Image (cartoon, helix red, strand yellow):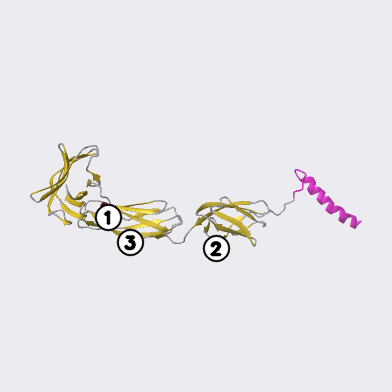
Amino acid sequence: MKMINKIIFPVAMILCFVGCSSDNKLEVSLPASPELVIGEEVLMVKIGEENKAELKVLQGGGDYNAFSANENIAKAEIINEKIMIEGVGMGKTYIIVSDKNSYYVKQPVSVYFTDVLELDKTEVEAKSPVGRPVTITVEVTNGNGGYRAVSDNDKVSVSITQAGTITVTGQPDDAETETTATITVTDNLDLTATLKVRITPTTNPYTDVELEKILSDSSRRYYLDEKNQVNPDWSVNFRNTEENERITYGWDYYSYNFLLTFTGGKTEGKKTDASLSCYNYVGWDFVTYENQVINLEIIKNDGTHIWGVYSFTKDGTLYRGYFCDTTNP
């Protein structure tokens, strides 16, 4: 009898438990599958097969698969049960990772080219004609794109293309003072490089590079401040005369003219008693000078053609020009 009671009591307790349930269902809790968790917020991978990086799984169900959203930027493969990422091209993409429990993770990947940002120059010095800005160009030789550039001197401006061409423009405050600046360049990885810039004033109108360009062209022309003073629509009368040891080059057209006068012959070298007289329209600009004293130098005379450069300072600004014409009238 005691044995029967021992059996009946547990059965009764179970029936009572089931009968008291509000929905008459027995719920059984099973262990939950672990979610898939990746170790990095953004995986940085350097381009090259030799620089493969592991995408570490902190938690997951195993049997992992991975593929890249853009295989032109990065590739994914499973090697010895590890997810390995190879950088192919600079940029950003995603690696999609899944496990046997059908959990998925979309992992950002950033692929870069170099660990060092480098410029073709770290220091530059340029001469600026008094009162006029000068432009300097420097190239990024090693970097990861996404370039930015800033100057620590608001008198020296800087811009940079996504190809890495840096353009710096500035000028001294006056004829006696140099201007300096530090340019800081940054790329996509926030790597930085600095460029030291020094701009000094000069009264020399043209650089050696500019002079070479002037001498490379033997066509007849008369320039003042980067503008050709010969109107192509006018049938001007070109002047190449000498009177009382004073030589005159230029042209006239009715009341308009552009005349350079100097002494000292047509040989190469600096000339004396040089002046500019001009009454001319260039586009919409009216240009006029009357016996403006100038510094003039014949930079080449090959027996057939003559090249000369000239300059003068007015209101704190250096004006410059050049000409080329035939040696003989």
Write down the region rendered in magenta: 1-27
Q: Mark 3 and mark 2 in contact? Answer it, CB < 8 Å.
A: no
Q: Secondary structure at mark 3?
A: strand
Out of 113 and 15, give the one closest to the viewer: 113
Residue 123 is marked as: 3
Q: Secondary structure at mark 2?
A: helix
Q: Position of residue 27 (x, y in %)?
A: 74, 49
Identify the mark nearer the N-term, 3 or 1: 3
The answer to whether residue 39 shows anywhere in this view is: no
Graded by Cα atoms within 10 Å as few (under 14), some (14 to 19) or many (20 or more), the crowding at tag 2 reads few
**Residue type for callout 3:** Glu
Looking at the image, residue 59 sits to the left or right of residue 234; the answer is right
**Quadrant position of residue 298:** bottom left
Q: Is residue 19 magenta?
A: yes
Q: Quadrant of the N terminus?
A: bottom right
x 24%, y 44%: residue: 228
Q: Secondary structure at mark 1?
A: helix
Query: Is residue 39 depicted above or below 283 in this figure?
Result: below
Q: Mark 1 and mark 2 in contact? Answer it, CB < 8 Å.
A: no
Q: Position of residue 283 (x, y in %)?
A: 24, 38
Residue 249 is marked as: none
**Quadrant position of residue 286:** top left
Q: Position of residue 133 (x, y in %)?
A: 26, 51
Out of 111 and 3, give the one closest to the viewer: 111
Residue 50 is marked as: 2
**Residue type for callout 1:** Glu
Q: Mark 3 and mark 1 in contact? Answer it, CB < 8 Å.
A: no
Identify the mark nearer the N-term, 3 or 2: 2
Graded by Cα atoms within 10 Å as few (under 14), some (14 to 19) or many (20 or more), the crowding at tag 1 reads few
